[in-house]
Image: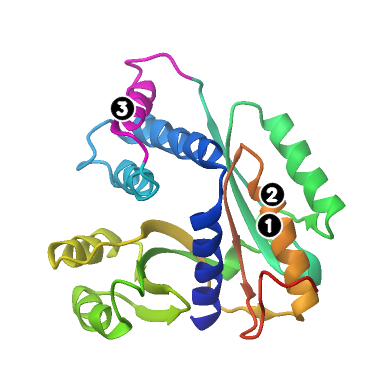
Amino acid sequence: MSGHSKWSSIKHKKGATDAKRGKLFTKIIKEISVAARLGGGDIEANPRLRTAVLKAKSVNMPKDNMDRAIKKGTGDLEGADYIELIYEGYGPGGVALIIETLTDNKNRTAADVRSTLAKNGGNLGETGSVSYLFNRKGLITFDTNKYSEEDIFEPSLEAGADDVSSEGDVIEVITSSEDFHTVLDTLETAGFENSTAELQLIPDATVTLTNAKTAKALSLIDKIEDNDDVQSVSTNLEIPDDFDPDTEY
């Protein structure tokens, strides 16, 4: 999973310097509200809500924001009714993309996603065209400035993790979706403080492009993620070892 670990490292660096905190909060609030609407407002009894709250805590979202989002989802406060839509497509070099959205206007979101892809070397695919390449798994990351891979490796595998790897300043623990919370609880109980913990679509295999095409693919993903309706973008792009996100190719 070294390619995915490199991808996590780049996203971690971007997140550490990204000034668009308000946009990120809005997306997480949507997810919390939908999770509460579908599974109830009890965090311990609703795995999806618990995962969303973990993500909120990882970006230091105030507790009041989380509580209001939960109440909007359960109907205790008035809120928008979001629907989940998933788009599949391709980016530069033919990399696979799965775009997960929450929206109150599916026509707007579909038009925006299609336009962004078309203007940046990508295109929409049919439902099922790339989803078979991915599996939903747990992803827990840790900062190498706090821990070494050796610190995390043994307790993670003993708790049921599938894989542990590191790249740059990120240690990445991959689990099955079923074992995600068990591994997370075990590591938290052992005193390991994670940077992020969420369920993601992880590719079974990856593709490698030239640095120039990798840069174009990452630029497209950034533009898609900038859309307020887009919750996440998953890709099978493997980042080359010599790729530098700060270099113009």
Identify residue for label 3: 64
Q: Residues within 10 Å of mark 1 (few under 14, many from 20)?
A: many
The span picked out in magenta is: 61-79
Q: Position of residue 106 (x, y in %)?
A: 67, 31
Q: Is the Cβ of the residue at disc 1 closer than 8 Å to that at disc 2?
A: yes
Which quadrant holds residue 206? bottom right
Q: Is residue 186 visible?
A: yes
Q: Residue at x 36, y 69 (%)?
A: 143
Along the horizontal axis of the image, is 237 left or right of 170?
right
- Mark 1 or mark 3, which has the lower sequence index? 3
Identify residue for label 1: 221
What is the spatial separation of the Cα atoms under label 3 and label 2, in whole angstroms?
Answer: 29 Å
17 over 172 or under it: above or below: above
Q: Residues within 10 Å of mark 3 (few under 14, many from 20)?
A: few
Q: Which mark is residue 224?
A: 2
Q: Position of residue 124 (x, y in %)?
A: 77, 53
Q: Quadrant of the C terminus?
A: bottom right
- Mark 3 or mark 2, which has the lower sequence index? 3
Which quadrant holds residue 239? bottom right
Q: Nearer the viewer, mark 1 or mark 3?
A: 3
For the residue pair 220 and 204, the one nearer the viewer reads as 220
